[in-house]
Amino acid sequence: KLMEEDWQKTLTWGIQDEDYYVNDEGRFMKTQEQRDNAADAAWKLANKADAFYGTAPKMEGYFSDGNATSASNQPEEYQASLRPFDKEVLGAYGFNSYVDFFSAPPENPVTYPAWSVDLVEGSPAKIANTKLNELSTKYLPKAILANTSEFSSVWSEYVSEIQKLDIKTYEDRINEVLKWRIDNWSVK
């Protein structure tokens, strides 16, 4: 029941015509008084179940009617919450929100993420990886904190210790799994 849209709307937006209204286009909106109430700690304590909702299961994104699951994610409400300075800055760039400053994320290849490859506990690849991590924990802080005159010797010692490991088994395991992903997985 809690995950039904009606309950989610009540928990996030409140009660229609009391905490928000629906405009002629079916969009959930708030009056300035309703926005002020939602930001007032005393009002929230008396009218919202924030402590419960914070740990309760919840919908994220948009309801089936196209309204955002929270007022702060509703584009019209976000715009209404901006200060004049923010509107001016965003307008100068032709943006609607600060998120517009970010580039679209690149599409991940089917092999992504390589760090999720199971190295199999006790295998030579897992042992090499564990030892490599131990060396990093030991030597990288030393290298970072070393005086300029000591850096080269600390770095050389670190590289020398890495060369003693069977890194090839680690690389082979990663490559084996990535090849399997290419052959068997799809990003679509």
Image: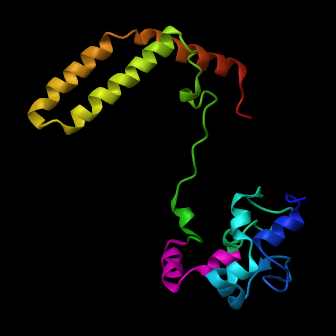
Q: In the rendered image, is residue 127 in sight? A: yes
Question: Which image quarter holds the N terminus?
Answer: bottom right
Q: Quadrant of residue 110?
A: top right
Please state the total of marks drawn on the protein image: 0
Write down the region rendered in magenta. 76-94
Which residue lies at the image location 86% right of the left edge and 66% below the top edge?
Answer: 7
Residue 57 or 65: which is nearer the viewer?
57
Residue 171 shows in the view: no
Does residue 107 sit above or below 101 in this rendering? above
Q: Residue at x 43, y 10 (%)?
A: 168
Residue 17 in the image: x percent, y percent?
85, 86
**Residue 60 higher or lower than 170, as above or below:** below
Q: Is residue 127 magenta?
A: no
Q: Tell whether position 79 is magenta.
A: yes
**Residue 173 figure quarter:** top right
Q: Could you say where residue 27 lies in the image, as x and y percent from the top left?
A: 81, 76
Quadrant holding the C terminus: top right
> Could you tell me which residue is drawn at 59 percent across and 20 percent down?
118
Q: Is residue 14 shown left or right of residue 111?
A: right
Relative side of 31 to 163, left or right: right
Magenta region, mostly helix, strand or loop? helix
